[in-house]
Amino acid sequence: MAKVVIGLSGGVDSSVAAHVLKQEGHEVIALFMINWHDKSVTLSSNCSWSDDLIYAELVARRLNIPFHTVDLSEEYKKRVVDYMFSEYEKGRTPNPDVLCNREVKFDVFMEKALELGAEFVATGHYARKETIEVNGKKTYRLLAGTDQNKDQSYFLCQLSQWQLEKALFPIGDIVKPEVRRIAAELKLASAEKKDSQGICFVGKVDLPVFLQQKLKPKEGNIIEIDKNYYSEKINIQLNKKFSSCELKTLTVDYIYMPKDGQIVGKHNGAHYFTIGQRKGLGVGGKVEPLFVIATNVEQNVVYVGQGQEHSGLYRTGLFIDQSELHWVRPDFEMKEDDNQEFMVRIRYRQPLQKAKLFRKNEGMYILFEEPQRGIAAGQFAAWYKEDELIGSGVINS
């Protein structure tokens, strides 16, 4: 058996993960991360890290495992929060949970765990790891969690083979109701604790207030675009051959940036909004709800359209710059001018979508069999073969 450090967050998932490790005979050490101190931006109804710390200590005591804390707030700010501000300033929508896993949980936190003598680092993610041999070398597969309603492999889409080598996911093959049952049976303090929401280790925040720490409000126009402005949705035949020019037209050049429309209101900064957003516009009196269909941070304009089926919300594909590509399975990396079909998702819990990936010198073009709603630059696209996550990348456009 091994010496394992569990990232004990105070939630039910990591609590049961610690129990499973003990049941398997491992020497388990609990390590709690402090990543955020500023309570001014968190909503008062949500627990702070200090509350989570109490839960984590109670669980560790109940399971009779050593308990330690580590303050990673400085690293978290540099690697996650500053990145978020930078992305929003560019008009992109970052995913801090993916960054937190890559840059904090399985990097600086892992380093601290290894300093404690850990052979492995465990978390409460609903994902699975499998070790196989490829060309005589150990290779680690990142698989979807057994509970399809809670699968969190998407949040781990930027992990490397080195990170996976040291990672354990003890509850990856357990469904959430069973996790709750086990916690209740063990009388763990976290048994009925609600799942955390909002930004990883920050909590649920008032996003405009959070962003205003560095991004100043700037009044601009909200412009409504008629639902007939765009042509009909395009359906892609994935067996067709596409030239680089056609791929660029269907992805990079297919971003909606209207030049006309009706001014229907004002906003405090285009960088506060994301594609598909409905709340926070402050514009009423419409037959159907308004949704953000595009933003222009340079001109400080937010474009909106009525109804969740507005054609401006849908796109046929996306582009990932060469520098933003990541392969969880490097042995599956596509060569230049290669194309392959994968199942792709562009957000957590989105059903996998059939798509074809086209590798070019400048990066990866992804075309979907059916148009996708709310593709937002800055988010991550992850591609799968059956239940294995193969690679991912930051959506450039």
Image (cartoon, helix red, strand yellow):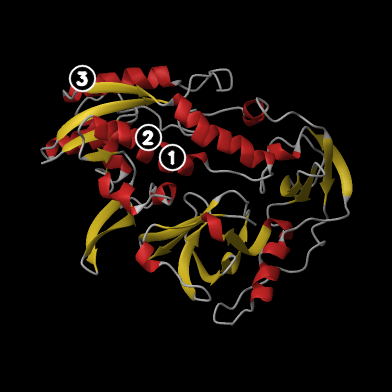
Residue 295 at x, y = what percent? 74, 47
Mark sitting earlier along the chain (3/2): 3
Q: Give neighbour class at mark 1: few <14, some 14-19, many 20+ (Cα, 10 Å).
A: many
Q: To which residue does mark 2 refer? A: 108
Q: Is residue 258 above or below residue 281?
A: below
Q: Position of residue 144 (x, y in %)?
A: 35, 54
Q: Nearer the viewer, residue 52 or 130?
A: 130
Q: Please tell me whether mark 2 sits on a helix, a strand or a loop.
A: helix
- Residue position for label 1: 103
Residue 174, horizontal then vertical, whole percent: 26, 46
How much space separates mark 3 and mark 2, taking CA atoms?
25 Å
Q: Quadrant of the C terminus?
A: bottom right
Residue contact at pointers 3 and 1, CB within 8 angstroms: no
The dot on residue 61 is: 3
Whether residue 35 is visible, yes or no, is no
Q: Is residue 250 visible?
A: yes
178 relative to 382 in the view: left or right? left
